[in-house]
């Protein structure tokens, strides 16, 4: 598989409980479930970087949009 | 400390999780802790959903069946 | 809020001043030129250039870039053996489309690729009958990776309908939309399309109709016809301030499920929060299962745009209107399925399809063209 992997560790009882609830859900392993959940958590938090346009640019774009009849 | 099981995740995801931890202000000390927390939370939600015993469930299903809902 | 750009940052790599020193040049095709402009204007954010080998393989195997961001279609630049001669990693090259300077690229990597492996991963088949696969097989053996800076736009006949992600983002904000649904199309709208769009629009602030123009097979609607037909439909049947119509120039890859995700990612970059996925989105022949284009979205909890799976609409005589499987209990004898192929056949014979298939005004607009088809 492409890409580097690393490991996290969780208590065994937790692992077993997760293994139990993902039965018949389409997740093939505890690992794929943990990856899914973690991606969801991290994505929901990712901060939007500041948009990279100046006031002038914004004005020019609004002008264009007006000319085209979009606004 | 009890027994632990290790799980493979992409390195990049691990690093993003680390960044998440730093930015969320010291709530978690490590990715391990974050993962453990999130999984426990999921499990407790799961458990809240099942506030009845298997016997109760069977009885309710019987009733729903007799009423024609299932 | 308008959606965040994919990967968090809207890519804009535009260079206005460029001194022509001794620089090597590379001729690119129209398709490549469009990929270049799409990269530099953020349609493909977070890409800043053509994929290097590492990212390329990661997209094939994991459906993600090597930084774990979802990405399903490799954006690559193939070059012929002759053109590769004299190019090496670290060089700056000028990319030209005919006599137009399109972009500068700093070559990061030159590598070979396995086209069969590509076909297997991206198309799920190595069958050369598949239009996407056959196209891949005809490509050159070397790929060049590197960051780009746009010098000039690719010429377009659709200036009037060309909006880039930064423009739609500002536009949506100006209109006060917080939730926007994107709609991908290569067709003139019939009642089924209208139904699906309005079903979605009922729950969001705005609709972004985004026809893909430039790549047509024989028998397809001409691009001008599609745009005119939409203008007519919007004028007569949509409230004025809930729709934006603008074109997207990028190639159709017929990669089914993977392309559905790719389509969603592009519309996310335009600012859409939702995107309508057809049952056989970007499919061709029988290469993909009926709901594969829906299922693949389960793999991306971190996509950042919400797919809307709206069932195909049909006319039901009993319901007396456009409905779908989920809301109509009647059986086949009452249902009239709207087939794009049938509508095209009627229009080709100069006939106006019945109103329950296509709006009268839309049909008349199409028929007003001397030859509406390719
Ligand atoms: Zn019905």
Image: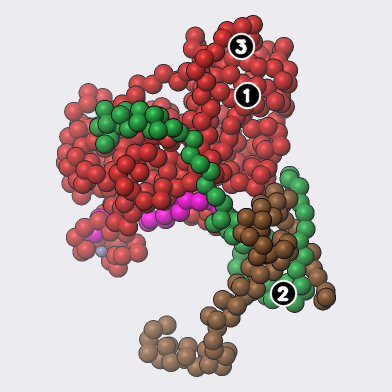
Chain colours: A green, B brown, C red
Are the residues flagged by discs 3 and 1 from a single subunit? yes
Magenta region includes residue C84:
no
Residue in the foreground of this view, choosing between C170 and C93: C170
* Mark-to-mark CA distance, 3 and 2: 59 Å
- Side (left or right) of C330 relative to C132: left
* Mark-to-mark CA distance, 2 and 1: 48 Å
Q: Residue at x 40, y 29 (%)?
A: A57
Residue B27 in the image: above or below residue C130: below
Label 3 Cα neighbours within 10 Å, binned few <14 / some 14-19 / many ≥20: some
List the residue tagged with mark 2: A14
The circle drawn on residue C25 is: 3
Magenta region includes residue C313:
yes
- Side (left or right) of B30 relative to C224: right
Q: Residue at x 49, y 12 (%)?
A: C100
**Label 3: which secondary element:** strand
Marked residue chain, label 2:
A
Residue in the foreground of this view, choosing between C154 and C294: C154
Provide residue A64's location: percent of width, then percent of height.
Answer: 32, 28
Residue C372 in the image: above or below residue C295: above
Are the residues flagged by discs 2 and 1 from a single subunit? no
Mark 3 and 1 residues: CB-CB less than 8 Å, in contact? no
Marked residue chain, label 1:
C
Q: Quadrant of the C terminus of chain C?
A: top left
* Mark-to-mark CA distance, 3 and 1: 14 Å
Q: What stretch is highlighted in magenta?
A: C299-317
Q: In which quarter of the image is residue C325?
A: bottom left
Provide residue C310's location: percent of width, then percent of height.
Answer: 38, 55
């Amino acid at each position: 598989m492409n890409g580097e992997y690393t490991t996290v560790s969780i208590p065994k009882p937790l692992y077993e409980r997760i293994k139990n609830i993902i039965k018949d859900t389409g997740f093939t392993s505890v690992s794929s479930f943990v990856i899914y959940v973690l991606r969801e958590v991290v994505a929901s938090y990712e901060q939007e970087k500041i948009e990279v346009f100046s006031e002038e640019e914004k004005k020019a774009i609004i002008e264009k949009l007006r000319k085209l009849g979009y606004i | 400390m009890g027994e632990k099981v290790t799980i493979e995740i992409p390195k990049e995801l691990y690093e993003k999780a680390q960044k998440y931890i730093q930015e969320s202000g010291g709530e978690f000390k490590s990715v391990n802790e974050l993962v453990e927390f999130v999984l426990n939370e999921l499990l407790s939600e799961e458990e809240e959903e099942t506030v009845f015993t298997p016997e109760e469930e069977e009885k309710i299903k019987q009733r729903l069946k007799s009423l024609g809902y299932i | 809020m308008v959606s965040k750009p994919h990967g968090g940052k809207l890519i804009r790599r535009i260079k206005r001043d460029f001194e022509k020193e001794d620089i090597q040049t590379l001729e690119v095709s129209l398709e490549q030129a469009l990929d270049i402009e799409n990269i530099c204007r953020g349609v493909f954010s977070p890409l800043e250039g053509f994929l290097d080998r590492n990212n390329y393989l990661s997209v094939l195997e994991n459906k993600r870039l090597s930084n774990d961001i979802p990405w399903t279609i490799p954006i690559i630049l193939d070059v012929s053996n002759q053109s590769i001669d004299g190019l090496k990693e670290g060089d700056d090259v000028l990319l030209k489309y005919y006599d137009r300077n399109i972009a500068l690229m700093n070559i990061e990597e030159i590598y070979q690729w396995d086209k069969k492996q590509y076909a297997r991963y991206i198309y799920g088949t190595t069958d050369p009958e598949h239009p996407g696969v056959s196209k891949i097989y005809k490509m050159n053996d070397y790929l060049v990776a590197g960051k780009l800076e746009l010098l000039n736009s690719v010429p377009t006949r659709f200036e009037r309908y060309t909006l880039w992600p930064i423009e739609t983002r500002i536009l949506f904000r100006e209109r006060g939309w917080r939730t926007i649904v994107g709609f991908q199309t290569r067709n003139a709208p019939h009642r089924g399309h209208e139904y699906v769009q309005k079903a979605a629009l009922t729950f969001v602030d705005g609709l972004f109709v985004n026809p893909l123009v430039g790549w047509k097979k024989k028998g397809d609607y001409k691009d001008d016809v599609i745009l005119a037909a939409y203008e007519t439909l919007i004028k007569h049947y949509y409230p004025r301030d809930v729709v934006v119509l603008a074109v997207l120039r990028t190639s159709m890859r017929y990669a089914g499920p993977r392309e559905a995700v790719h389509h969603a990612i592009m519309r996310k970059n335009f600012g859409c929060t939702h995107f309508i996925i057809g049952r056989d989105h970007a499919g061709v022949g029988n290469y993909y299962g009926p709901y594969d284009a829906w299922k693949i979205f389960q793999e991306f909890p971190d996509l950042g745009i919400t797919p809307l799976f709206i069932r195909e609409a049909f006319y039901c005589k009993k319901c007396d209107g456009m409905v779908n499987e989920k809301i109509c209990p009647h059986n086949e004898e009452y249902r009239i399925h709207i087939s794009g192929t049938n509508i095209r056949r009627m229009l080709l014979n100069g006939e106006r399809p019945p109103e329950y298939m296509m709006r009268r005004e839309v049909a008349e607009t199409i028929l007003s063209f001397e030859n509406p088809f390719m």
